[in-house]
Amino acid sequence: MRRFIFALAVAGLAAPAAQAADPAQLKFGFPAPPQSFLKTKVFDAWVADANAAMAGAAEIKMFVGPVLGDFRNIYDRTIAGVADLSFGIFGPIGNQFPKTLVVSLPFETRDAIETSVVSWRLLASGLTAAEQSKVKTLALFSFPSASVHLDKAIANVQGMKGLKLSVSTKLIGQVIENLGASPVAIPPTDTYQSLSRGVIQGIVTSWNAFQTFKLAEVTRHHIEAPLGASPAFLFMNKDSFARLPEAARKAIEARTGESLSRRLGVAVDQDEAANRNRVKALAGQTIAGIPAAEMGVWRQAAQKAVDGWVADTEDGAKLLAALRAEVAKHRR
C-alpha cells in the first residue's frame, strides 16, 4: 500500500513539471548594436507580440550584436540553424541575391516604405523567390537611398576622385567608382573606427546609420543623392518554422509578410528624418544636395551602373520593368 501511495505521489509531482515545460526557444540573430532603432522601435514589440500570440508553444529570444553571427554571415548561420530567425542586410551577401537587389538601383525609389512594399511584392510575384528558397522570408524592407557622407568638404564632383568610401552594396560601389572614388566593403559595425583612423574618407549610407553607429562624430559634410537603397531582410530557418505547432506557425505568419515589411519601412523613414534633423542641428555639419550643374554627371554615373546590372543579371530588363511597374502602382 505504501508503495502504491508513493507512486501516486511521484506521478502527482511529475504532472505539473511536464505541464510547465519551457516552450521551444527560437533564437533571433540581430547583428546590430542594442541601441539600434530597429530593435527599440520595431522588433522588441514585434517579438513580445509574437510570443504572446504563440501562447507558450514557442518563444522568440533576441540575441543582439554578433552573438549568433555578424552582417557577413548571419544568413549562412540561419540556414545552418545557428539562428532560427535573423535580421540582416543584403549588401554583404549580394552576390547570392542579384535579382532581389533590383530595388537598390539608384534614382528608382524614393523612400523606405515604397522600397519595402515593392520588395515584398516582387517576391510575392515570384520574380525574386528562387533566390530566397533556402529560407522562409518573413519580411523584406529597406533603408532609404544612400547619400555621401565625408570627413572633409569637397568643392565639386571632381573632389570625389581618389577618396575611399565605404559602401553597402556592389551596385552603389559601381556608382561611386564611376564618380572617381574607390569603394570599400566594410561592415557597418566597423565604419566608425575606419573613418576615425583615416582608413576611409567617407561612407555612402542612409541617415539611419548615424545614431546607431555614431557617424556624426566622424563625418561633417553630406551630399544627399539617391544613389540606391540598401535592402534588408527578416529570414527564418525553414526547418525551425516547420517544427512549430500549427498555431505558432499561424501566429508568426499573421505578423509577417507585406504588413511587417511596410511597418519596418515606416519606422526606417521616421528614423531617417529624425537622424537628418539631429545632424543638421549640430555645429560644423553641412548638408547639401547635388548641384544642378553637376546632376548630369551623377546621373550618368548611376545609369552606367544600372546598365551594367541589367546586362549582368538574368532577366535584368524584365526585373527593372517590374520594379518600375510596382513603384508606379504604389504611387497611385
Image (cartoon, grey):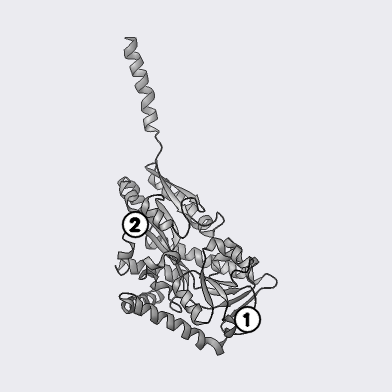
Q: Secondary structure at mark 2?
A: strand
| Circle 2 crowding by C-alpha within 10 Å: few under 14, some 14–19, many from 20 | some
Q: Is residue 311 above or below residue 98?
A: below
What residue is shown at x 39% (from left), y 29% (from top)?
A: 17
Number of numbered discs visible in the structure rendering: 2
Instruction: Give the percent coordinates (x, y) of residue 87.
Output: 44, 58
Which residue matches tag 2? 136
Give me the disc on residue 154. Answer: 1
Which label's residue is closer to the chain start, 1 or 2?
A: 2
Foreground residue among 169 and 129: 169
**Residue 166: in sight, yes or no?**
yes
- Amino acid type at image mark 1: Ile
Taking the image as shown, residue 5 lies to the left or right of residue 269, namely: left
Instruction: Give the percent coordinates (x, y) of residue 153.
Output: 64, 78
Q: Secondary structure at mark 1?
A: loop
| Outermost residue toward the bottom in this view | 293
| Outermost residue toward the top in this view | 1
- Using the rendered view, name the quadrant where residue 190 is placed: bottom right
- Amino acid type at image mark 2: Lys
